[in-house]
Amino acid sequence: LGVLTITVPTVLIGVCKGAMMHCHMVTLPTLVVLGVLLAVLASIAAYLDLKPAKRA
């Protein structure tokens, strides 16, 4: 989902063409940062979920 969040505004659909427009200046970097954060947190969660539990 994080990778999809990054690819939609950058590759698949894109944002406004104007460099000074709000959607280009604010929305694109926000979606990229949130997508990277989501991908990192999801990979950490998957790693912790797949790691064998310690037996006491």
Image (cartoon, grey):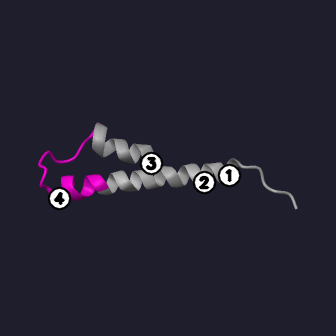
Q: Please tell me whether residue 38 is drawn above or below residue 6 in the rendered image.
A: below
Q: Between disc 3 and disc 1, whose residue precedes?
A: 3
Bin the neighbour count of mark 1 within 10 Å (Cα to Cα): few under 14, some 14-19, many 20 and up.
few
Q: Between disc 3 and disc 2, whose residue precedes?
A: 3
- Cα distance in 3D space between marks 4 and 2: 33 Å
Q: Is 32 left or right of 55, judged from the image as shown?
A: left
Q: Is 27 left or right of 46, judged from the image as shown?
A: left
The amino acid marked with disc number 2 is: Ala
As for residue 7 lying within the magenta part, the answer is no
Q: Please tell me whether residue 40 is drawn above or below residue 56 in the rendered image.
A: above
| Magenta stretch, residue numbers | 12-29
What is the secondary structure assignment of the residue under circle 4?
helix
Tell whether label 1 touches label 3 (CB within 8 Å): no
Q: Which residue is mark 2?
A: 45
Q: Which residue is mark 4?
A: 22
Residue at (21% x, 47% y) in the render: 15
- Cα distance in 3D space between marks 3 and 1: 18 Å
The amino acid marked with disc number 1 is: Asp
Q: Which residue is mark 3?
A: 2
Tell whether label 2 touches label 4 (CB within 8 Å): no
Q: Which residue is mark 1?
A: 49
The amino acid marked with disc number 3 is: Gly
What is the secondary structure assignment of the residue under circle 2?
helix
Q: Residue furthest bottom?
A: 56
